Image (tube, rainbow, N blue to C red):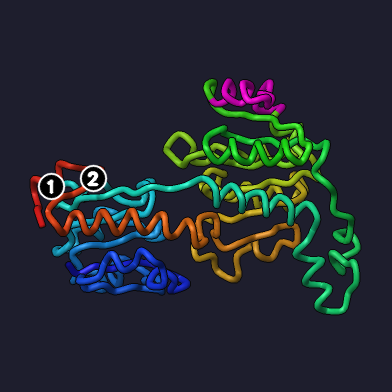
Amino acid sequence: MKIAILDDYQDAVRSLDCFRLLDGHEVKVFSSSARGAGQLAIRLAPFDALVLIRERTAFPRALLAKLPNLKLISQTGKVSGHVDVAAATERGIAIAEGVGSPVAPAELTWALVMAASRRIVPYANNLKDGLWQTASINPQLNGLGRVLKGRTLAIWSYGKIGKLVAGYGKAFGMRVLVWGGEKSRAAAVADGCEAAASREAFFEQADVLTLHLRLADGTRGIVTADDLARMKPDALFVNTSRAELVAPGALEAALRHGRPGWAALDVFTDEPLPADAELLRMPTVLATPHLGYVEKDSYELYFRAAFENVVSFANGNPTNILNPEALTKSLP
């Protein structure tokens, strides 16, 4: 099969141990993103199968219609709204889903909490410029960092990642406060956390607030400007899940008004994030380039499953197909 691996920004996939699973196939790895559906269609038209790295590229109906040779989309992890499944099914394009792990994103979340709370990045950068114990040359921002012990960690959604983050918070002596659906709150209480009395209380009491929701129609823009305005002036807002969980422009406006006072972000509505993005110009924001799952063990896990699905499909034994109806329209 002719296989394309998309958006491998670091050209890291070919160095993975699992890459050898594709031996015998014609494989092209793209390390740069194509801008525009037209350019992307020309790039991908020759391929029988695509391996997607999470949601880095969207595949709407119009783009799928321009890929006549495409038989399989092999997804690393689960499909999350970036592929028009109905359109793919109509065109006989099978979609294979993979597996994932909560460990890497949970650990990155905690790394951001620690780094932002102690102002580690600005301290380290200023030290290279000869400035000792200086968080900022702006006197208003040159305050002290703070410990986490005794403070309130607010977690929205108590799924696999949220549960790990809650455990980290407990280990650091934090009060863990959870908001979410009834089952989510009940599970948190059973594990010794607290359920917030209300959504308003959840935002008002947080010293560190972190989102661990799935992005769906019901959660898109679920965090509003009113929610953020309830946060403390010295609170930290953390988002390693999806930028679209926050109403458009709400976080930027909230940070300009000082509630919350700080943010640590790994996800953005436009990725790769342009260098002139407002969030990157805010000294109260710690931003990382969507690294939640970007580490060696996670890549081996994600891509091994994706490559195994490709090989199974090529051998006439499709596995983990999200839309099996497509198989009746186009068989390898």
Q: Are marks 1 and 2 in contact (CB under 8 Å)?
A: yes
* Residue 187 lies in quadrant: top right
Q: Residues within 10 Å of mark 2 (few under 14, many from 20)?
A: some
At x 26%, y 67%, the residue is: 22
Mark 1 and mark 2: Cα distance apart in space: 9 Å
Where residue 93 sits in the image (x, y, percent)? 18, 53
Which residue, given by chain and number where applicable, does mark 2 sit on?
Answer: 321
Residue 280 colored magenta?
no
At x 65%, y 47%, the residue is: 238
Where residue 12 sits in the image (x, y, percent)? 44, 71
Q: Locate residue 275 relative to residue 74 in the image: left or right.
A: right
Helix, strand or loop status at disc 1: helix
* Residue 207 lies in quadrant: top right
Residue 41 visible? The answer is no
At x 82%, y 72%, the residue is: 126
* Residue 164 lies in quadrant: top right
Helix, strand or loop status at disc 2: loop
Query: Which of marks 2 and 1 precedes in the sequence?
Result: 2
Where residue 248 sits in the image (x, y, percent)? 55, 48
Which residue, given by chain and number where applicable, does mark 1 sit on?
Answer: 327
Q: Amino acid at mark 1?
A: Leu
Q: Locate residue 287 relative to residue 219 in the image: left or right.
A: right
Total label count?
2
The segment highlighted magenta reads 184-201
Residue 186 colored magenta?
yes
